[in-house]
Image (cartoon, coloured by chain):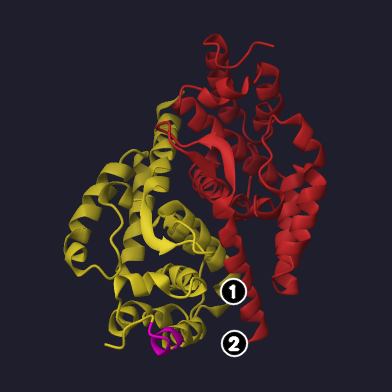
Chain colours: A yellow, B red
């Protein structure tokens, strides 16, 4: 087997480990915790089906690929809960090291391409990254909503914390943000999200 | 919320159930069984990274979307093991009913689009569907190979059965088929796949 194909297959096998990285979100039907690979799969399909709600014109295949790979670094760095202030401080350093190790398994051109796409997602500046982030926010909110907000309740999450993250959904989609905002308000009213 | 968006979000929530459909394949590192959502995520990334090996020119975003949705019908129909002759007989009828129910949650235009893409995958005729099938074959073979062929051994799978499915990989990619063929021969030699 030639060296290039061997590297591509080594990377393909390595990312299998993403299926073992579990998130705080639970599957609908009060199921088990969700893992990163499932979350990425779900986001990519949602991005495709909801692309008409993007504020800006987007290249949907770039968005989908961004969704699919955006959590690969968590194979080494672990999942950092969106409302865990302590671990959020070290998140960037842990994820940078992981990015270097994991994407280096690929041939140089593909390492450069996937690293750039990951960095673009993180930078939150392009239309594609804003819409991918909207999915990264909407997908777990949808699951949590379907489970009566139990993930927020169990973590004692406040409206300020949820808004801090979810308000950025409007950068990707004003229309989807209206849905998000209404779900948040509903759970604040029900006491599943703390008022302050 | 308007009716169209509501339907799209209902579908998005419904497909969360695909994460509960477990396959015969085990994760690398002798892990647990893999589920359909993880398998689809893995296939879509592999399709993107390995697209240069397609025999024919392909629209890679169509291939990726095809990979992502190809097992959604198993939410109702369940996973049918590739070497389970009895269940394979009823597979089509079960999957057709599931396809109708699940894709009908979407707005009519998106129902038609995803149904057509699913049918295209099943028909195994277009360049895109042949390459998507190559991923559907290569991905579990790669995991099983990484685990010393235990899934084949535990099911008493024969070389004839493996070749019956895996030889079609060459329809999508001659070059990837060479890898597949060499892995199969290795496991036949080691006795993990039965000779007849």
Q: Look at the image and tell me whether residue B107 can be seen.
A: yes
Numbered mark located on residue B9 in the image = 1
In front here: A3 or B180? B180
Local crowd size for mark 1, using a 10 Å CA cut-off: few (<14), some (14–19), many (≥20): some
The answer to whether the residues at label 1 and label 2 have Cβ atoms under 8 Å apart is: yes
Provide residue B124's location: percent of width, then percent of height: 75, 42
Picture quadrant of residue A49: bottom right
Q: Residue at x 62, y 33 (%)?
A: B173
Quadrant, the C terminus of chain A: bottom left
Q: Is A189 included in the stretch rendered in magenta?
A: yes
Q: Position of residue B33 (x, y in %)?
A: 51, 39
Location of residue B123 (image quadrant): top right
Which region is colored magenta? A186-191
Using residue B7 as the reference point, say whether residue A63 is left or right of it. Answer: left
Q: Which residue is mark 2?
A: B1
At 74% across and 72% down in the image, what residue appears?
B109
Q: Quadrant of residue A116?
A: bottom left
Callouts 1 and 2 in the same chain: yes
| Residue at horizontal 39 percent and vertical 38 percent from the top | A11
Q: Is residue B144 above or below residue B58?
A: above
Question: Can you give x and y, in whole percent of width and height, for residue B152 in the image?
Answer: 58, 23
Where does residue A185 sit, x and y in percent of width and height?
42, 88
In this image, A141 relative to A162: left or right? Answer: right
Give the Cα distance between marks 1 and 2: 10 Å
């Amino acid at each position: 087997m030639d060296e290039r194909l061997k590297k591509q297959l080594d990377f393909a096998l390595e990312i299998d480990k993403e299926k073992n990285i579990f998130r705080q979100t639970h599957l609908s039907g009060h199921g088990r915790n969700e893992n990163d690979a499932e979350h990425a799969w779900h986001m990519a399909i949602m991005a495709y089906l909801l692309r008409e709600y993007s504020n800006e014109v987007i290249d949907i295949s770039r968005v989908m690929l961004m969704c699919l790979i955006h959590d690969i670094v968590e194979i080494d760095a672990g999942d950092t809960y969106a409302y865990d202030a302590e671990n959020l401080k070290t998140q960037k350093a842990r994820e940078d090291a992981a990015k270097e190790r994991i994407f280096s398994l690929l041939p140089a051109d593909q390492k450069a391409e996937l690293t750039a796409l990951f960095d673009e997602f993180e930078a939150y500046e392009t239309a594609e990254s804003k819409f991918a982030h909207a999915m990264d926010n909407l997908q777990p909110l949808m699951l949590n909503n379907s489970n009566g907000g139990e993930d927020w309740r169990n973590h004692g999450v406040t409206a300020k914390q949820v808004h801090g993250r979810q308000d950025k959904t409007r950068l990707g989609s004003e229309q989807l943000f209206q849905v998000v905002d209404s779900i948040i308000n509903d759970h604040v009213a029900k006491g599943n999200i703390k008022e302050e």
